[in-house]
Amino acid sequence: MSKNKDQRRVPAQDPNVDRFLLGPGAKVFDRLCDVCVHYLGDRKCKAYPAGIPDEIWQGRAFHLSPLPGDNGIQFARRKSDGVS
């Protein structure tokens, strides 16, 4: 188990552990799309130019691997977003 500053426990094997443990100066964001290099704004991106599906937009599905209709493009974190 990994612990953050507040001593809350997160299973070390959790593939999303980085989402829960924020380092110094980390910025909090509402959805993965906000920090993706492919996000175009207005709920559109290069993967879904007609509109990001609700499952992804609302955080019920992470776009870390291919999903139907994503044009072969998946999430890639922007380097300049300040998220650690």
Image (cartoon, rainbow, N blue to C red):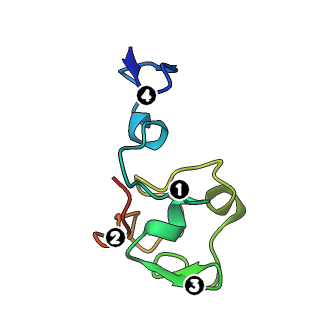
Q: Indicate the secondary structure of the residue bearing disc 4.
A: loop
Q: Tell me the quarter of the picture where residue 50 sits.
A: bottom right
Residue 60 vertical position relative to residue 3 in the rendered view, above or below: below
Foreground mark, 4 or 2, reads 4
* Label located before the other in sequence (1 or 2): 1
Q: Nearer the viewer, residue 19 or 57?
A: 19
Foreground mark, 1 or 4, reads 4
* Label located before the other in sequence (4 or 3): 4
Residue type pointed to by label 2: Arg
Q: Indicate the secondary structure of the residue bearing disc 1.
A: loop
- The CA distance from mark 1 to mark 4 is 16 Å
Q: Tell me the quarter of the picture where residue 55 sits.
A: bottom right
Foreground mark, 4 or 3, reads 4
Mark 2 is surrounded, within 10 Å at the Cα level, by few (under 14), some (14 to 19) or many (20 or more) other residues, namely some
Q: Indicate the secondary structure of the residue bearing disc 2.
A: loop
Badge number at residue 5:
4
Image coords of residue 79 (percent x, y): 28, 69
* Label located before the other in sequence (3 or 2): 3
Q: Label 3: which residue?
A: 41
Residue type pointed to by label 1: Val
* Left or right of 40, for residue 72: left
Mark 4 is surrounded, within 10 Å at the Cα level, by few (under 14), some (14 to 19) or many (20 or more) other residues, namely few
